[in-house]
Image (cartoon, grey):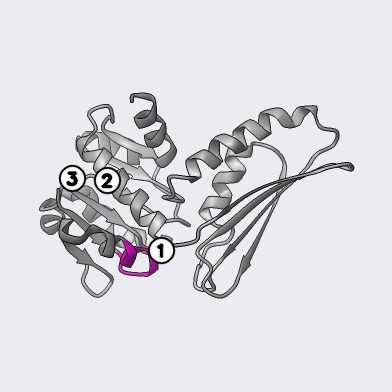
Amino acid sequence: MKISVIGTGKTGSKVIESLGERLLHTFDDSNPPTKEQLAEADAVIIFVPGDAVNDILETVLASGTPAAWGSTGFEWPEDLDRRVQTLRTKWVLATNFSLGMNLIRKAIQSMSAGAGVLKDPAFHIHEVHHIHKKDAPSGTAISWKEWLDQPVNVTSEREGDVNGIHELTIKTATEEITLKHDALDRSIFAEGAIWAAEQLVHNEHISDGVHTFGELFDRVTQTK
């Protein structure tokens, strides 16, 4: 299996390093891809900022290549799923490619369901990232808010070279509950993106169209 990568920043570089001999092409803003080049790969992994997605979106679509997107801070077109299905290809969109984040997702949903027994719970999500991250709150924090489905205060902090720390706190007058995810190394995002790309290409249970990383994870784990 050969995989191309668009984006050579902090996380894209980790993907390139992790792929080894499976790497086909690398692209960035000084070397943009063509649809023909992308079509040579079995899949493409994309880590570009949200404000750069429009520059490559149509090219990736035109190539028909399965794509794993790790871009945040971008509002995807409403007809994207239909267009990807029409091309008979598969995409996955992720705010966070950590496989462990799917365990967090299930934990947050469970905490939300059980919070009704608590007296006047207050919810707070806090996220910390490196100073070069442009979007705030992070895409992951937004996902946490969606998974929680409760009124919640979301705060952000930018410092140093932090890979990503997310923390959910549920507080009442008599107790405090905390759930935390700390990305110790960006390689977890690279590993998850490569795993997702492999599923798009090889897993017959994945249908054409656009999937979230959580949907992909659940489909794979439920069919084993």
**Chief secondary structure of the magenta portion:** helix
Q: Is residue 33 visible?
A: no
Q: Which residues are magenta?
A: 7-14
Amino acid type, mark 1: Pro
Q: Position of residue 102 (x, y in %)?
A: 48, 40
Marks 1, 2: nearer the viewer? 2
Measured Cα–Cα span from mark 1 to mark 2: 19 Å
Q: Is residue 8 visible?
A: yes
Q: Of all residues shown, which one is farthest toward the right?
A: 173
**Which residue is labeled 1 in the image?**
49
Few, some or many residues within 10 Å of mark 1 (<14, 14–19, 20+)? some
**Which residue is labeled 2 in the image?**
197
- Dot placed on the residue nearer the N-terminal end, 3 or 2: 3
Measured Cα–Cα span from mark 3 to mark 1: 22 Å
In the rendered structure, does residue 9 fall within the stretch colored magenta?
yes
Query: What secondary structure is found at the residue carrying circle 2?
Result: helix
Query: What secondary structure is found at the residue carrying circle 1?
Result: loop
Q: Position of residue 69 (x, y in %)?
A: 34, 51
Amino acid type, mark 3: Gly
In the rendered structure, does residue 3 fall within the stretch colored magenta?
no
Q: Is residue 145 left or right of residue 30?
A: right
Nearest to the observer: residue 84 or residue 17: 17
* Label 1 close to label 2 by CB (< 8 Å): no
Q: Is residue 219 above or below residue 76?
A: above
**Which residue is labeled 3 in the image?**
64
Marks 3, 2: nearer the viewer? 2
Q: Position of residue 35 (x, y in %)?
A: 15, 55
Few, some or many residues within 10 Å of mark 2 (<14, 14–19, 20+)? many
